[in-house]
Image: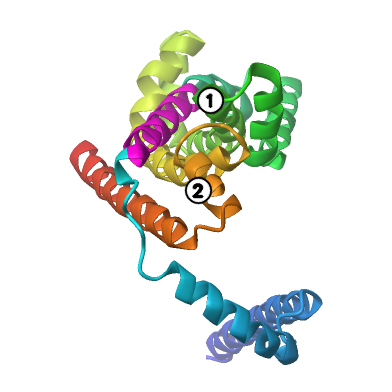
Amino acid sequence: MKSVSHTFDAILEEQRRSALRGVGLVGLIVAACVAALAATGFFDAQRFLESGPAIGTLASEMVPPDFSRWQSWLRPLLDTLAMSIAGTALAVVFSLPLALLAAPNTSPHPTIYLAVRTFLAFLRSVPEIILGVLFVAAVGFGALPGVLALALHSVGMVGKFYAEAIEHVDPKPLEAARAAGATPLQVIQHAVLPQVLPQLTDVTIYRWEYHFRASAVLGIVGAGGIGFELISALRLLNYDQVSAILLSILACVVIVDTVGAYLRKSLK
């Protein structure tokens, strides 16, 4: 009886310690967030009060939105959509083989695994807008530098997500396929991809939704699309057209998100 009571007390003590560790971790995270907000001036009430009139003036100039040039925005919006689709397609084409090399259960060698992981981390570390500036300088203005910037950055992100999905597959089908004499390619085809395909599809669709929003930003640096129209309106201080363009982008984002949700539901 004492043994049972001792075991129960030990379990309670371990749960209490675990709860205290969790509370301590949450406290550290909250403290770090508060420190970051303070470092960026979020708690500077005087600054917010002084900016109030300027915000009010800007808001009054943006209302009502001016849609008089809506026809000239149709082609840039289509370019933005095309950039998002093309960038996603290229990202998937390059991410999948890299993910197979970056997953420890499918990578042929630890050195290759480490090298590919480092390469994917490097691609993620460079923002799309910086890549957009570089590609605009390299290949000129238009949608092409935007597509290349989206694809290159997303290879780092999508490849990481793909690799993590592959890493956590059930190992038993892989072991069975290898025991049956399957080649590495056959193991991937018959034991890995069937398990991760739904997750890869979800990641791909989410990334496409993100790419549409990112494409609008890339247009600001000359990579084509609706972002170019937005920065032009901002430079001319046509804030009523700025609000109209932002509303147009919002409408397209809602449509893209709806289509993405439908695709995810249909492909399950």
Residue 205 in percent (x, y) is at 36, 39
Q: Residue at x 51, y 32 (%)?
A: 224
Residue 96 in percent (x, y) is at 50, 24
Looking at the rendered structure, the secondary structure element under dot 2 is helix
Residue 182 in percent (x, y) is at 43, 9
Q: Which mark is residue 142?
A: 1
Task: Report whether 16 appears left or right of 266.
Answer: right
Q: Residue at x 54, y 38 (%)?
A: 219
Comes first in the chain, label 1 or label 2: 1
Q: CA distance from mark 1 to mark 2?
A: 15 Å
Q: In this picture, is 217 found above or below 246?
A: above
Is disc 1 surrounded by few (<14), some (14 to 19) or many (20+) residues within 10 Å?
some
Closest to the observer: 92 or 60? 60
Can residue 19 be seen by looking at this rendering? no
Q: Is residue 85 magenta?
A: yes
Residue 154 in percent (x, y) is at 56, 34
Q: Main secondary structure of the magenta part?
A: helix
The magenta segment is: 72-92
- Residue named by callout 2: 230
Q: Amino acid at mark 1?
A: Gly
Q: Quadrant of residue 33?
A: bottom right
Closest to the observer: 174 or 162? 162
Q: Residue at x 54, y 72 (%)?
A: 58
Task: Report whether 223 appears left or right of 73.
Answer: right
Looking at the rendered structure, the secondary structure element under dot 1 is loop
Closest to the observer: 19 or 247? 247
Task: Report whether 214 appears left or right of 80.
Answer: right
Q: Residue at x 55, y 86 (%)?
A: 8
